[in-house]
């Protein structure tokens, strides 16, 4: 393979469109100049559409995890009770953030590879009536599960006044998101997934109900104080130095989404999910999740008769195809294929063909082309 060619098919960071790279290479400007204000003016309405909200979406310089911690410290005070739904590694991260801030955490553990149900969340809220916030993961990156946050939020609100706070890092921009209609109070995502940017930005949208809680929160905070970002963004500015090059790229990434049409963006991701899953089924390789709970942005595969890490090593060494491994107790047990952001059905057909060759070299007895053919059929029947 060519030495500087890299086929990046992990669930983040993801490939960056050429026009976004070009936008990020623009000459630097002053972050207090009118040009910077104009840039934020252009970005604000486009981000609202992606989140499905009328509220401003606040951009912060930081990773997705910084956005999760920002959500915690702004909405919850020490000794408050919260419910953290853990369907994988990133739900577990929410739990660890809460514990680090001395928050009384009730943890709802769901077997990895399964989605949480509204009934399970409602039962926990009945058991713990003093819960102030429910922390959810929309797409659990470590397992490829898409949790039904719409239904969960509805069920939770029937039982409690708790805020609904969701990690959408690995799916917002690639799946339908209607924050306001669904009753999500805080929604977080990051730049390096379906948003088609390098890592370095996190975005948070906050409901009117959550803003009231944030205003009353006495917890000390400085850089992560969402009130300062809200107030500055109202004036088309930021409280601290923004990641301007990433904002240049963000504006172009949002332009690409608008040109394609958000509904078409979501349909493309769903199609790629179906193509990928059909291929592994045709090759008789088990998937970690059911079709009903599978995410359109990442597919988790649980091989039974070959070594997942050895297979990934072959794909990387022979074709420069990067696939993700498992996390925590799933390390060595699964591999994960990212198909989000700057990715199309043509890319799916490419990586599936490479995967088949790597499978043979890893000792898996398959009929070459069978998985690709299954994906082609899904595409043709779409």
Image (cartoon, rainbow, N blue to C red):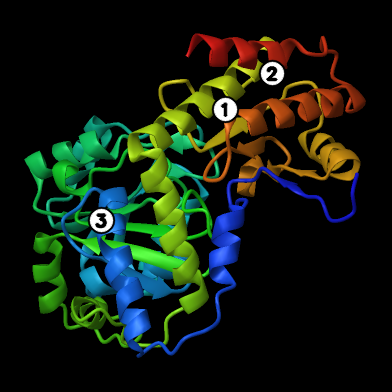
Question: What residue is rendered at 59% in x and 72% in y?
Answer: 25
The first of marks 3 and 2 along the sequence is: 3
Say whether residue 324 is left or right of residue 358.
left
Q: Does the rendering let one see residue 48?
A: yes
Q: Mark 1 falls on what kind of element? A: loop
Assess disc 1: are there few (<14), some (14-19) or many (≥20) residues with their C-alpha within 10 Å of its C-alpha: many
Say whether residue 201 is left or right of residue 377.
left
Q: CA distance from mark 2 to mark 1?
A: 10 Å
Question: What residue is rendered at 27% in x and 34% in y?
Answer: 120
**Quadrant in the picture for residue 121:** top left
Say whether residue 176 is left or right of residue 24.
left
Q: Which residue is mark 2?
A: 285
Q: Nearer the viewer, mark 1 or mark 3?
A: 3
Of residues 47 and 228, the one drawn nearer to the viewer in this rendering: 47
Query: Is the Cβ of the residue at disc 2 closer than 8 Å to that at disc 1?
Result: no
**Residue 96 drawn above or below residue 28:** above
Q: Does the rendering let one see residue 198?
A: no
**Residue 41 drawn above or below residue 219:** above
Residue 78's disc number? none
**Quadrant in the picture for residue 337:** top right
Question: What residue is rendered at 46% in x and 59% in y?
Answer: 252
Residue 288's disc number? 1
Q: Mark 2 falls on what kind of element? A: loop
- Quarter occupied by the N terminus: top right
Q: Nearer the viewer, mark 3 or mark 2?
A: 3
- Please provide percent x and percent y for residue 103: 29, 69
- Please provide percent x and percent y for residue 344: 58, 34
Question: What residue is rendered at 10% in x and 62% in y?
Answer: 208
Q: CA distance from mark 1 to mark 3?
A: 33 Å
Residue 48's disc number? 3
The first of marks 1 and 3 along the sequence is: 3
Q: CA distance from mark 3 to mark 2?
A: 39 Å
């Amino acid at each position: 393979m060519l030495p500087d060619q890299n086929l990046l098919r992990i669930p983040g960071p993801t490939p960056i469109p050429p026009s976004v790279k070009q936008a990020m290479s623009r000459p630097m400007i002053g972050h207090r100049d009118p040009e910077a204000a104009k840039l934020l003016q252009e970005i604000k309405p486009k981000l609202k559409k992606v989140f499905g909200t009328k509220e401003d979406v606040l951009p912060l310089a930081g990773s997705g995890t910084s956005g999760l911690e920002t959500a915690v410290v702004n909405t919850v005070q020490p000794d408050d009770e919260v419910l953290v739904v853990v369907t994988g590694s990133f739900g577990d991260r929410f739990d660890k953030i809460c514990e680090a801030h001395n928050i009384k955490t009730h943890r709802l553990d769901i077997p990895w590879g399964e989605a949480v149900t509204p009934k399970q969340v409602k039962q926990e809220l009945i058991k713990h009536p003093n819960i102030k916030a429910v922390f959810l993961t929309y797409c659990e990156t470590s397992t490829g599960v898409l949790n039904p946050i719409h239904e969960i939020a509805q069920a939770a609100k029937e039982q409690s006044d708790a805020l609904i706070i969701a990690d959408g890092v690995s799916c917002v921009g690639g799946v339908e998101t209607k924050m306001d209609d669904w009753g999500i109070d805080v929604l977080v995502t990051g730049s390096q997934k379906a948003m088609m940017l390098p890592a370095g930005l996190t975005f948070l949208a906050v409901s009117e109900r959550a803003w009231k809680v944030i205003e009353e929160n006495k917890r000390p905070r400085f850089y992560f104080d969402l009130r300062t970002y809200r107030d500055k963004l109202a004036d088309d500015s930021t409280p601290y130095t923004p990641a301007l090059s990433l904002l240049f790229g963000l504006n172009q990434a949002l332009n690409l989404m608008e040109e394609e049409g958000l509904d078409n963006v979501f349909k493309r991701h769903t199609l790629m999910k179906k193509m990928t899953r059909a291929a592994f089924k045709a090759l008789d390789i088990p998937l970690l999740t059911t079709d009903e709970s599978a995410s359109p942005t990442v597919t988790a595969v649980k091989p039974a008769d070959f070594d997942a890490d050895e297979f990934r090593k072959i794909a990387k060494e022979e074709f420069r195809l990067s696939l993700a491994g498992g996390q925590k107790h799933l390390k060595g047990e699964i591999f994960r294929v990212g198909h989000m952001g700057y990715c199309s059905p043509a890319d799916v057909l490419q990586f599936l063909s490479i995967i088949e060759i790597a499978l043979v070299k890893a000792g898996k007895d398959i009929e070459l082309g069978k998985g690709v053919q299954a994906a082609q059929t899904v595409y043709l029947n779409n």
